Amino acid sequence: MIAWTIYISFLGAAGLLLLPRGSVALARVLALLTAVAGFGITLTYFLQHRTGEMLTITRVPWVPSLGIEYHLAADGISLTLVLLTGIIAITGILFSWDIVERTREFFAFYLLLIGAVYGVFLSSDLFLLFVFYELVIIPKYFLIAIWGSTRREYGAMKLVLYSFVGSAMVLIGLIAAYVVAGAKTTSLSELAQFPFSLHFQMLAFPLVFVGFAILAGMWPFHTWAPTGHVAAPTAASMLLAGVVMKLGAYGCLRVAMTLFPLGLGPWGFHVLGLGSWRDVFALLAVIGIIYGALVALVQKDFKFVIGYSSVSHMGFILLGLMTLNQLGLSGAVLQMFSHGILAGLLFAVVGRMVYARTHTRDLAKLGVMNLNKVIPFAAVTFVIAGMASMGLPGFSGFVAELMILIGVWRAYPLLAVCVGFGIVVGVVYIWRAMQKAFFVEAGVECAPPKPPLPSISFPERLGAIILIGASVLIGLYPQVLLNIIVPALNSPLFEGLRKGSWQ
Amino acid sequence: MIAIPWISLLTAIPIVGALVLLMLGGQNKNLVRWSALVFGLAAFVLTLFLWHNFDSSSASLQFQERYNWISALGVEYHVGIDGLGLLMLLLSSIVVPIGMLASWQIEERVHLYYSLILVLQACLFGTFTALSFFHWFIFWELSLIPVFFLIRLWGGPRRTSAATQFLVYTMVGSITLLLSFIAIFLATKKFDFIDLAALAQNGQLMPAVVDKLAWHRFTPEHVALVLFAGAFLGFAVKVPIFPFHTWLPSAYCEAPTGTTILLTGAMSKMGVYGFIRILLPIFGPQMQIVLTPLLWLAVATIVFSAYAALAQKDLKRIFAYSSINHLGYCLLAIFAVLKFTGGNAALITQKYAAMNGVLLQAFNHGLTAATLFWFVAILEKRSGGLRGLNDFGGLRKVAPVFTGLMGITLFSTLGLPGLNGFIGEFLIFKGSFPLVTWATSLAVLGLLVTAIFVLGILQRVFSGPLNQRWVSLPDLTMSERMALAPAIALMFVLGLYPQLVLGVVNNTVIMMVQHLRF
């Protein structure tokens, strides 16, 4: 049944294009209904299958001569991310409620993107997964290039080029695995059982991992992310930061790490103190955390602060993956969910509530407007989102980052201290942006914007409340998701990873 | 019969209050103020009820609630109070209404102001009752947010930097604290304070940590000391201890005075509470290793802050430094208790005295400092924001009641016998002197300097020729007198009958001292 999340999104997209020109209100409602239906289906499935183990949904031969199947399956990890996608889809539409320019096309591309994302998360066949993964790129290009702002062509093109390079690396790795295995199958679970030689895994693992990690914003391949996020319209930034970056992290975990677990093992020699690809990627992740935070600290453009904060937070996910223990990995999956929600919320505040009203993202210009009095709801939402994003207890970010930190303590105690420093910088940049954007400096003449800004609309309030609610729910009772994530990590698929420090 | 979760209920009251205030909106200011006060008093009544039903002959945890929370991390929802917890609850529920009354003149966004205060109260209650690190840390961290905004939005001219400095300092401390506890969790799979204290007592805690973390280049002692340093920093910033105190004077000074009352009266006790509840039982042996430097820090905190107070011209700054000074005595005694005595029975009794003194002093300081800042708030309201030491003079002629009552409070700060400040300091000095003679002797200097600056205030503000500017300064109104009376009365009551507090905490103290491993 959960497969219908994909179909219904595509049907919704098609339906939107069939609507008569100019039917703006109808297009919005149809898009919203589609998104709600998708989320409803996921929620029903979630309530029915709370064990978290891998269950096949559909499995029919597609290209039998090559062993390619149309194989959809869901486990706790996919389900978590599908839930995230559903929430972001709904709130993204709520935050795009007053798009007037080519509304039908906007929502059609939007739903196409959503459908493809659902497809990636639910595919259990590598070929199928790759098809959906490529399908994501097209709508996101158009969403940015047509409806974007600041340097949108540049941002869109950069994003697409990076995505294609990443995909190419993944494709090469996967084809190599297919050929080497010679098993005439592209099924993930079957290929994961194949004993690839150590030498092959050592070569294939970094290729596929980096290919996916580019989309996850791993330093130094992150530069597409801030420019892309800034250029994108609000709903697309929410999707990009909230969901699309998770595709990369999901690919790293689901494909690279399960197919080539030996690639994480020691090389047998040390270069600059690094003894394995695992060490290398853990180090890159930590650099990403600190670098993203430091760069966010000096931005003048409000949206860039959030763009770089995404790089920093995605570093946590990659670092969690590299801990290779249960706490670290489940923390990473939880962080995928948490960051999806929070990045969505932050972009909604910056892009929709502030930029669409004030038409500036310059922190210096926003500062004198004293926005906390003009649009208090936006200020409160940003404060809450900022608190959650800097990992304050009680919100989802804290539990996720805590679990990752515990995992890191076990695997790389020294890096844990560096991450601590990254968290401090995280507090500072969020706080700096909040003060500069919403609060007038003491002693500075405040100049309220003219004409008065429109107040925050109902759909915007609803969207913000949904996202905050999700973050608080997971922050106070993370067991909701951990109940399905932990069994999924203990499933046979991840057997290759469960050794050494796994606990 | 289902036991009523009193403690969860207590934490919920201010949260509900905050939500109600936000819904009321800022239109009817008096309605907002009164409803806030009603919620504050409701919490006070509930703590009185807890006190009434508290069995003070037992040192065990009472009103416990314990449920599974996050099984993946082994986190439980575990709350409960012993004498220490109850005392802190009482203190916070007394200080919060004082803070509310002292903020009556706030006019701007009243509903937001009071709901932030109520959120802070909920965080205080949560911190003082939580028995699991995870749960405790939520409230510990969350408390920063209302304080930050109280300073940032309603503070004085340099509020931006004061609020930011406050936030960053405490956040850095919190993160090192978190890292230490994560390391401990890794080794023991436990977040529960009581379980961890039991492990530490058996001497199993640090070996387990060293075993699990396996930092081959470090000796077990070093690992333990590093973890202790991380946790120590978190509390040292909060109390604060010299040299981590620099955020405090500007935060206290720039905060609206009603907020300063909460900061000094209740929030600074979070640090002292952390020392007693967390550091002492869990890191006792490590603290013993570095006892001498710790004592130096305590002495420096006491003496330097007293001298700093002497040099200030702003009443709020003087009292801010005096706050640091008073909590320094608490730290001195806490460290003194750790002194190795090899089971000498006479010295053990001194330890009981010192520890009782710490709790009494924490309570007294909360009460006295809150009242002192309240007087400053009243003075500021009349003088249009002026509060410099030299801005006044001869006030006793125009405002005799104000002078008298503030004088009583000042003498209580000084530790005059018969008032509440005396017994706590007496017990601390009596207990610490035989344990750590040199440090205690040096700390006496702090008492002396305190006397000088307190008398200086009396002289420059209240005596001397009347400053012509304040000829028509009104004395305390009847409602102000009514509001202040209970606080002043409590100072006398505690000065004459300290058993009121000591009875609650004595058994807890005895058990705490006995549980220290020596």
Image (cartoon, helix red, strand yellow):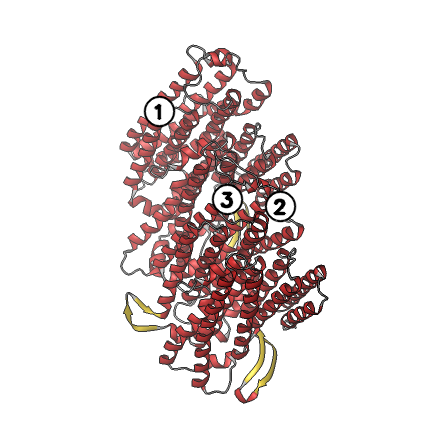
Query: Does label 1 or label 2 sit earlier along the sequence?
Result: 2
- Mark 1 lies on residue: B310
Tag 2's secondary structure? Answer: loop
Give residue A26's quadrant in the image. Answer: bottom right
Dot 2, how many residues are within 10 Å of its Cα: few (below 14), some (14-19), or many (20+)? few
- Mark 3 lies on residue: A365
Do marks 3 and 2 share a chain?
Answer: no
Query: Residue at point 68% right, 67% down?
Result: A16
Q: Nearer the viewer, residue A116 or B299?
A: A116
- What amino acid is at disc 1? Leu
Q: Nearer the viewer, residue A152 or A349?
A: A152
Give residue B268's quadrant in the image. Answer: top left
The image shows residue B216 at horizontal and vertical percentages of: 28, 61
Marks counted in the figure total: 3
Give residue B466's quadrant in the image. Answer: top left
The image shows residue A195 at horizontal and vertical percentages of: 42, 82
Dot 3, how many residues are within 10 Å of its Cα: few (below 14), some (14-19), or many (20+)? some
- What amino acid is at disc 2? Ile
Could you tell me if residue A75 is visible in this image? no
Could you tell me if residue A105 is visible in this image? yes
Tag 1's secondary structure? Answer: helix
Give the letter of the chain under mark 1: B
The relative height of residue B491 versus residue A271 in the rendered view (above or below) is above
- Mark 2 lies on residue: B4
Give the letter of the chain under mark 2: B
